[in-house]
Amino acid sequence: MTKYISIDPGKYKCGLIFADFESKRILQAVVIESQLLVQHIKDIKEKHQKIKVIMGNGTSSQEHVNNLSFLGESLKVVEEKNTTLRAKQRYYEIFPIKGFRRFLPKEVFLHNINLDAVAALLILEDFLNFKFTLDCNGISKTWLKQ
């Protein structure tokens, strides 16, 4: 099976998607503190040997590339231009606004949302040239913190 980890890197937090391309499923989607990224990837890699890691070339990416050097050839850095901006639209495809709230401007609901996991999803979808279909449980709003 081909499994991918996609990372939207950041100085303080990173979006992370763990997906199985063959089954077309997102196995995990989280926002994680940057200092926990290496250990989290090691934990996933321990359970799943053949994993490809895709990381956007944005904020702090070079620092993360250095920290993830143990991945060797399985780490690929890709263009992530406008993924955070596009993540706002994709978020509403995954979590549609329902009821009377759908008549309010969408911007009202975005101020406290961490879009990093959705941006990581877009990085993976752009890389694979494939759009994952997700249910509302596919992207979690979970923070992994120390």
Image (spheres, rainbow, N blue to C red):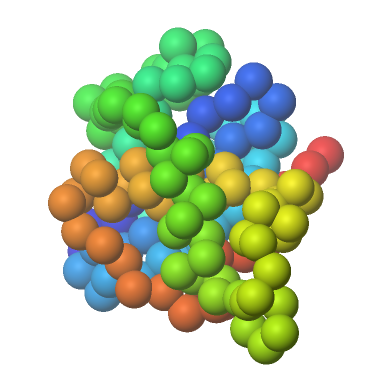
- Quadrant of image for the N terminus: bottom left
Q: Position of residue 74 (x, y in %)?
A: 26, 33
Vertical relation: 100 (above or below) 104: below
Extreme residue toward the bottom, this view: 99
Q: Position of residue 45 (x, y in %)?
A: 43, 46
- Quadrant of image for the C terminus: top right
Q: Position of residue 107 (x, y in %)?
A: 66, 53
Residue 2 left/right relative to 51 = left
For image coordinates 31% across by 66% down, the residue present is 132
Residue 35 left/right relative to 77 = right
Vertical relation: 42 (above or below) 109: above
Extreme residue toward the left, this view: 129
Count of numbered badges drawn on the protein: 0
**Res. 17 visible in picture:** no
For image coordinates 75% across by 47% down, the residue present is 111
For image coordinates 35% across by 42% down, the residue present is 123
Vertical relation: 64 (above or below) 91: above
Q: Position of residue 27 (x, y in %)?
A: 46, 66
Residue 77 left/right relative to 11 = left
- The foreground one among 109 and 56 is 109
Residue 50 left/right relative to 105 = left
Q: Quadrant of residue 21?
A: bottom left
**Res. 78 visible in picture:** yes
Vertical relation: 109 (above or below) 146: below
Extreme residue toward the right, this view: 146
Q: Quadrant of residue 54?
A: top left
For image coordinates 25% across by 45% down, the residue present is 126
